[in-house]
Image (spheres, rainbow, N blue to C red):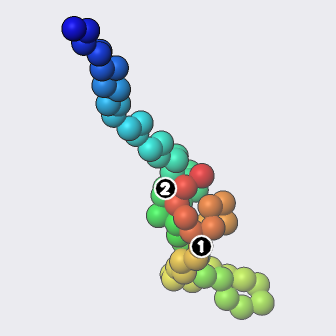
Amino acid sequence: MTTIKKPPAPRRRTPKPVPIPPSCETCAGTGETTTAVRVGRKLRAIDATQTGLCPDCFGTGTA
């Protein structure tokens, strides 16, 4: 009486971690930058700031 050998079970592998893209250096990963508000014909700066999308990463926060 001969016995039939089963093939060995495949080894389970842990999934590779998803690489995290580096954060943007200009906005520090927030996606927004602040600039001083300038008014008048001579473009004098006042004590106010405005926020906008980061020009390097377009608001995603990643490089």
Residue situated in front as seen by the camera: 2 or 26: 2
Can residue 35 be seen here? The reply is no
Q: Residues within 10 Å of mark 2 (few under 14, many from 20)?
A: some
Q: Position of residue 50 (x, y in %)?
A: 54, 80
Give the residue drawn at x 52%, y 47%. 21
With 38 as the anchor, is 20 left or right in this view? left
Can you name the residue that lies furthest to the top here? 1
Can residue 47 be seen here? The reply is yes
Q: Where is residue 42 in the image (x, y as percent from the top left)?
A: 76, 84
Q: What amino acid is at disc 2?
A: Ala
Whether residues under marks 2 and 1 lie with C-beta atoms below 8 angstroms apart, the answer is: no
Q: Which residue bears the numbered disc 2?
A: 28
Residue situated in front as seen by the camera: 3 or 51: 3
What secondary structure is found at the residue carrying circle 2?
A: loop
Q: Earlier in the sequence, mark 2 or mark 1?
A: 2
With 46 as the anchor, is 11 left or right in this view? left
Question: Where is 11 relative to 58, above or below?
Answer: above
Please tell me the numbered disc located at residue 53.
Answer: 1
With 6 as the anchor, is 59 left or right in this view? right
Give the residue drawn at x 66%, y 60%. 56
Q: What amino acid is at disc 1?
A: Leu
Q: Which quarter shows the N terminus?
A: top left
Q: How far apart are marks 2 and 1 (CA)?
A: 12 Å
Give the residue drawn at x 30%, y 20%. 6
